Amino acid sequence: MTAPLDLHKTGKRELQKEARRSAIIDAALEAFTQQGFTSTKLDDVAERAGIGKGTIYLYFDSKENLFEEVVRQTLFPFGVAAEQHAASFTGSASELLASHFRNFYEAMSSPKIPPLMAMISAEALRFPVIAAFFYREIISKAHVMLRSIISRGVESGEFRVDANDIFLQLLVAPVLASVTWNQQFHEQAPIDIESYRQMHIDFVLRALKA
Amino acid sequence: MTAPLDLHKTGKRELQKEARRSAIIDAALEAFTQQGFTSTKLDDVAERAGIGKGTIYLYFDSKENLFEEVVRQTLFPFGVAAEQHAASFTGSASELLASHFRNFYEAMSSPKIPPLMAMISAEALRFPVIAAFFYREIISKAHVMLRSIISRGVESGEFRVDANDIFLQLLVAPVLASVTWNQQFHEQAPIDIESYRQMHIDFVLRALKA
Amino acid sequence: MTAPLDLHKTGKRELQKEARRSAIIDAALEAFTQQGFTSTKLDDVAERAGIGKGTIYLYFDSKENLFEEVVRQTLFPFGVAAEQHAASFTGSASELLASHFRNFYEAMSSPKIPPLMAMISAEALRFPVIAAFFYREIISKAHVMLRSIISRGVESGEFRVDANDIFLQLLVAPVLASVTWNQQFHEQAPIDIESYRQMHIDFVLRALKA
Amino acid sequence: MTAPLDLHKTGKRELQKEARRSAIIDAALEAFTQQGFTSTKLDDVAERAGIGKGTIYLYFDSKENLFEEVVRQTLFPFGVAAEQHAASFTGSASELLASHFRNFYEAMSSPKIPPLMAMISAEALRFPVIAAFFYREIISKAHVMLRSIISRGVESGEFRVDANDIFLQLLVAPVLASVTWNQQFHEQAPIDIESYRQMHIDFVLRALKA
DNA sequence: GATGAATGAGTATTCATTCAT
DNA sequence: AATGAATGAATACTCATTCAT
């Protein structure tokens, strides 16, 4: 007797396969962020995932492909969350902007994300596919959102008129900078993210205010 | 009777050795920034420098040591230049700050520097020595300078009082962000550094002005 | 239900692995004795064993570790055999001693052993582990046995009383000397082991006789 | 004005060259015996000799040639000394034999010789030239001498008639054995050469006595 | 003659990928 | 499907030898 026809392939087999795939991605994320792409051995990934080395190749074409999938899978939820947030926001443009930046910092507080961001920067030159994906799925969406919030603020008179022309990188840069800084110079001079964040938001609003 | 002891060893031999050392560093900078540390083969460095493979080891202990020297030699001039500029500045605090940021962007316009910065970020986790050097020689000196300029501006009444407490990373982040951006997303959406810089400086002053 | 746990792991896989390990050791013994440790290339060992170069590292940690295992595996049987012989001997002390020395020469007649002995001597200074193993497993056991045989002969009145104090190296040296000699000077003046052995035993007994 | 014709080339230049050559050989002897042939770097030899690396090649064709010369020069004096001793000996055959063995042990007590002997054994297989030289210059001469002493003893009735047929290796082996032993197993169980030597000589005479 | 800078052939070891079981 | 044993291409580093100075 065969399994009932299932359009979404949610049979036992498929669920197991999906779980296995996730386990490998989790293991790989750990390994990649701790050791960097080149220094990570698939042996190590397999061991972390509790599977045989060859099994990885049943789910991914190559180490590079695995890397791409790790980035994709890990960052995808943030893209989705941001879009949902964008779709449902209410209130003044200033409040929305502040709330958005708080979300950015929130996302960056996950123990997985900062090392991943660092690794993406590190390997971006050699993985243009990753850079493109990152831009398309994360960055450009975030920019569209920010642009629309600012546009609202301009219309409502909260922000000065030429705020529409601002380089968004000027606004966002400090978020990434804080992450990078604490990754690289935590020993020398750690940043207290809490107050940094407040000052940053204050800063942004000051720059946009009418 | 022998030649007088030459304190600076400027004999032909020594000059050639220094030239050779420089050639290797130049070649390595190229290779490292194009391919990343791990993917760079010393064979390739040797070929670019027009020398034999073994020769590298007459000047550097190991690939890692070579990497460190590349970073050191390339960034050192900027540390020196910044200090000289710091020692000789005059004029209003706003003007000084603006001039300083223009210098930052100037430094980043060298074709060597942006890739080098990217590589440093990339490998910082695995080369704490590099991170420490970078912090000590470049970052902390820049911070000291900025702090003193802001302090002047506060005293003269140009800047608001609590400007002294600002996180300097908030001010500087966009410089690095622009470099990183054009490295990674030049294809997708290049930044025009010229106008970006002007907006950035305007931004900074707006945030500090009394 | 799974197969019963097999304590000795005699599955097909394990048998093959053991065979592979042996093949590598045999190949390495050949290579090492013909060319010496340093001059032996693992490429060559792999080729002799009919396997890939990397496979060696599935069984041995390093070239040095392989060398140690070669010595261990090759000499171990002789240690065991000597102990068994020691445990079961009967007859007069003179006969026993003679039989023991004949065994020594017998062992040395294997085509593998003399080159191996030479190599051990050759590399002993740089492989103290090998020297220690050799002393512990082979030499000291042989000495214990000889000592006990002589002691019997003294008790039975066959040997003179102070035979107990004799340096055993004086008795054994000619065995190794014959091996070394035929290794080094076979061209110039080969020793006929057969008569050498008889004369040696005669010599030993003459030295010990009451 | 040129130097006077000198048949033996004992001019200042030649003396210096000879001294330089000796210095290199001494340095090489040290290095080779401490580290073995393959592991010795000519850089190290040059440094020990206080000269430049290239200079070695003005005196020796290659590393192998240097090795051969080291052995030759170091062992040559012993061959000469033994011949002189042989030419001038008087007294009973037993006394002569004893005196000869004492000389052997004496020679072996030099700190240079035992490591050199070990090294010769170690590399003999790869340096047949060395083995041949060693046999010709040292071993065979020693054998001729021993043979003649024994022959005298037989004639004088001190030694038994068939002593003439004895394998000389049986007599000499313990000398080399003691050296080798203390090289390899000094840690585990050092031999006291003094008493070993006495016992050995006693042993030899006991084997030969009528 | 003497030097030591330059060379590049040579080698142990790693690890992504394959494939027989 | 899962495994892990086998592979061999790839690479940092060494060192005998040469040769311009």
Image (cartoon, coloured by chain):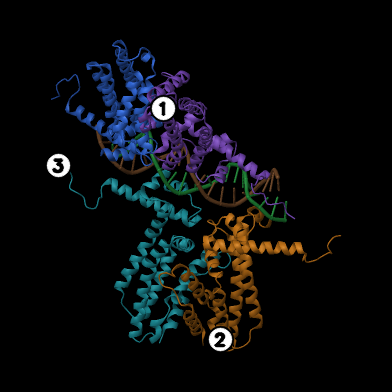
Chain colours: A blue, B purple, C cyan, D orange, E green, F brown
Residue B157 circle label: 1
Q: Closer to the camera, D137 or D210?
A: D137
- Amino acid marked by disc 1: Gly
Subunit of label 1: B
Task: Please state the horizontal and vertical placement of residue B120, each as a whole percent of the image.
Answer: 44, 35
Residue lying at the far front of the rendered structure: B156
Find disc 3 in the rendering and name its residue. Answer: C1
Cα distance in 3D space between marks 2 and 3:
83 Å
Location of residue B126 in the rendering, given as x and y in whole percent from the top left corner: 40, 40
Q: Crowdedness of circle 2 by 10 Å Cα count: few (<14), some, many (20+)? A: many
Q: In which quarter of the image is residue C138?
A: bottom left
Placement of A169 over or under C173, stated as above or below: above
Q: Which of B109 and B166 is in front in this view?
A: B166
Tell me which residue sits at (58%, 66%) in the image: C188
Q: What crowding class fits label 1: few (fewer than 14 Cα within 10 Å), some (14-19), or many (20 or more)? A: few
Q: Identity of the amino acid at label 2?
A: Ser
**Residue sitting at x 86%, y 60%:** D1
Q: Residue A134 carries which label?
A: none
